[in-house]
Amino acid sequence: MQENLSLYHIFYTVSRTGNISTAAKELYISQPAISRAIKKLESNLDTTLFKRSSRGVTLTPDGQILYEKAKGAFDLLSEGEDSILHNRSREIPRLRIGASTTLCKYVLMPRLKDFIAANPQIRITISCQSTYQTLKLLEEDKIDIGLIGRPQKLSGYEFLPLLQIQDTFVATHQYLENQHQLFPSEPLQHTATFMLLDEQNITRQSVNTMLHEHQMQLGHILEVSSMDLLIQFAQVGLGIACVIKEFVQNDLNKEILVEAPLGLTFPSREIGFVCKKGSQNQKLLTQLAEI
């Protein structure tokens, strides 16, 4: 029986590749050994399984019938192996975390080192997307924990706050000085280039609300795809960027950047981890929040 399985495996590989040389490389055996195996199987079945040509081998009608059956058998074996591996992988604890790219870099990453050290057995995956998409993935059970800014409504979820953040407008001192020299009698909101995240971002939406409440309209807006780019563009003097103050605090302390005098003070926002109430991941969420 063991010999027959070996013959069928060789037959299946030659049929699939259509070439004895290729099959020999895949099976790590010589071409003559493959030819002998095929001849033996043909002898056992009293039929011809392949037609040989200079281009390789093609199946005869009997060979095609046998190939379909062999393929089904080997596919079933492969499914069995996959099922066993899947069962084993389910035994490994896992934690799927969702966060925006900005929160992942500035909030999640600093916490992961200690968390992984304390939980080396956990397999962690991270997906980066907007807060709205993170909540959608959480609802669909495609992630276990989200790192988000606290929404106005969050029923059915457990939220563990981590820190308070505040939006602010920043630029280089030189950029603000240049604007003042070029347009001494004009307000900044009419002359400067303001760099903001795109309209779909929750931070941008809170900024729009604040501007609307103060009846302030910005004359020149440059939309940027990420917080990192906003910070870098501000650092090189491209314009005034709306960023999260805590993420540029070092630049503010060193006066690489300064806050733009627009007469706006944004309210603080809360950042934290979230998971569904009653989730088995609440303990891990608490551990992450306390690091």
Image (tube, rainbow, N blue to C red):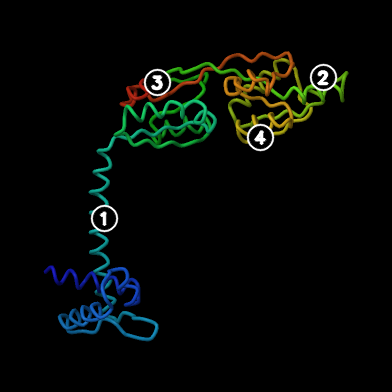
Give the residue at mark 1.
Answer: 79
Instruction: Determine the CA span between mark 4 and mark 3.
Output: 32 Å
Q: Nearer the viewer, residue 119 or 162?
A: 119
Instruction: Determine the CA span between mark 3 and mark 1.
Output: 42 Å
Q: Which amino acid is tagged 3?
A: Ile
Q: What element carries label 4?
A: strand
Give the residue at mark 4.
Answer: 224
Q: Is mark 1 on a helix, strand or loop?
A: helix
Instruction: Determine the CA span between mark 2 and mark 1.
Output: 69 Å
Instruction: Kindly check if marks 2 and 1 are in contact, taking CB atoms under 8 A apart as contact.
Output: no
Quadrant containing the C terminus in the rendered view? top left
Q: Name the mark on residue 187.
A: 2
Instruction: Determine the CA span between mark 3 and mark 2.
Output: 44 Å
Q: Which amino acid is tagged 4?
A: Val
Q: Which amino acid is tagged 2?
A: Pro
Q: Nearer the viewer, residue 24 or 274?
A: 24
Give the residue at mark 3.
Answer: 291
Q: Of tags 4 and 1, which is closer to the observer?
A: 4
The disc, 4 or 1, on the residue closer to the chain's N-terminal end is 1
Quadrant containing the N terminus in the rendered view? bottom left
Instruction: Kindly check if marks 3 and 2 are in contact, taking CB atoms under 8 A apart as contact.
Output: no
The disc, 3 or 1, on the residue closer to the chain's N-terminal end is 1
Instruction: Kindly check if marks 4 and 1 are in contact, taking CB atoms under 8 A apart as contact.
Output: no
Using the image, determine if residue 247 lies above or below residue 267: below
Dividing the picture into quarters, in which one does residue 34 lie?
bottom left
Using the image, determine if residue 228 lies above or below residue 7: above
Label 4: few (<14), some (14–19) or many (≥20) C-alpha neighbours in 10 Å: some
The disc, 3 or 2, on the residue closer to the chain's N-terminal end is 2
Percent across and percent down for residue 59 are: 31, 79
- Residue at position x 68%, y 34% in the image: 223
